Image (cartoon, rainbow, N blue to C red):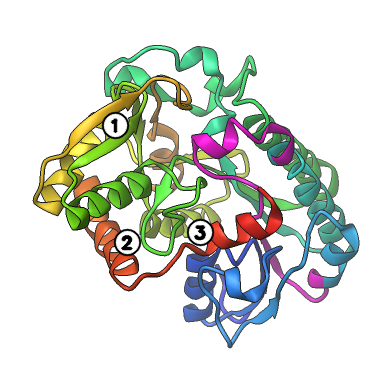
Amino acid sequence: MEKNKKVLVVGAGGFIGGHLVRKILDNGNEVVASDIKPKEYWFQDFDNAENYYATDMKDISNCRKVTQGVDYVFNMACNMGGMGFIENNHALCMLSVLINVHMLVAAKEHGIKDFLYSSSACAYPTYKQTEIKSAADQALAEPDAYPADPESGYGWEKLFNEILTNFYEADYDMNVRIPRYHNVYGPYGTWQGGREKAPAALCRKIIEAKLSGNHEIEVWGDGEQTRSFMYIDDCITGMDKMWASDYTKPLNLGSSEMVSINQLIDMIEKIAGIEVERKYDLTKPQGVRGRNSDNTLIKEVTGWEPSVGLQEGLEKTYAWIYQQIKEGKQDASLNYSKEAGV
């Protein structure tokens, strides 16, 4: 991104949004930061940004207000979480479609050309993710999104808004970027309360097992389902690489290092220095059976792909969550979810 620009980050109180605001400020830009959550529930909060707390972007009047005088828009806002949240809140996740619709309308009205919409690997068809295969065979490339059959609710919202964002690019001469994130994790992410994803959830469970002396944890499913997980630093770098390119279609932004949930537990056990007894619960939400990121296109477009190894990223994430638990802190999203009744 160019320096000395005014950048709007919607969803700035969330995990990726907070890291993004820090990076943009460090780059010498002015930041307008907004989030539906009140100030006390933001994951990271920066006094040198222009902050809009408790501001719901499903309301188009708020979108019009925060886009005034802005050069870039990063729409990171949506109602989301791990599979436990997504599979039990289809309507709530789908309502996030209003955020991007209204942000695009407001951006057009204010003459803003540069617009990033944050999509997800959940946009890929479920019928392509029903078996466990090798990492190469499990990898999903961008054209695989069609014929469409995305994750219920959340995935449909992502796929619809990808299409709409590209229509705005074509019809109104906008310059858009659409990263499809694959399971982003790291410090300052959700780690308890039901919205957390597998790396944080398993770090928390194993830390609690170590501190309590009861080395037994619950695992959702049989542990053989596969995913790739991208460390937050790679996510932020990847968006910067995308802006440096001229590619405006959806683009995978994820690690190609695929592991099973059981292998993920093995790695966290090594960090914790304990072994845990795994109690598998086949009744809990598991999502698709297998997924990996095909990075062929992002390497062609940017000359780069995510490179932080899972072991390295887990060590940093584990250390941060361990500190939260030792200090008796609670996840900001846990308290906000309770207040919002979700």
Give the mark, 2 or 3, whose residue is nearer the N terminus.
3
88 relative to 232, above or below: above
Q: Position of residue 189 (x, y in %)?
A: 44, 58
Give the mark, 1 or 3, whose residue is nearer the N terminus.
3
Task: Identify the residue shown where x is 58% and y is 80%.
Answer: 29
Residue type beneath disc 1? Ile
The span picked out in magenta is: 66-92
Residue neighbourhood size for the residue with mark 2, other residues' Cα within 10 Å, grouped as few (<14), some (14–19), many (≥20):
many
Residue where numbered disc 3 is placed: 16
130 relative to 193, above or below: above
Residue type beneath disc 3? Ile
Residue neighbourhood size for the residue with mark 3, other residues' Cα within 10 Å, grouped as few (<14), some (14–19), many (≥20):
many
In front of the other: 129 or 273: 273
State whether residue 299 appears in this view: yes
Q: Distance from label 2 to label 1 (Cα)?
A: 19 Å
Residue where numbered disc 1 is placed: 261
Give the structural element (helix, strand or loop) at label 1: helix
In front of the other: 19 or 335: 335
Kindly report which numbered mark, 2 or 3, lies closer to the viewer in this rendering.
Answer: 2
Q: Which mark is residue 321?
A: 2
Give the structural element (helix, strand or loop) at label 2: helix
Residue neighbourhood size for the residue with mark 1, other residues' Cα within 10 Å, grouped as few (<14), some (14–19), many (≥20):
many
Whether label 2 touches label 3, CB < 8 Å: no
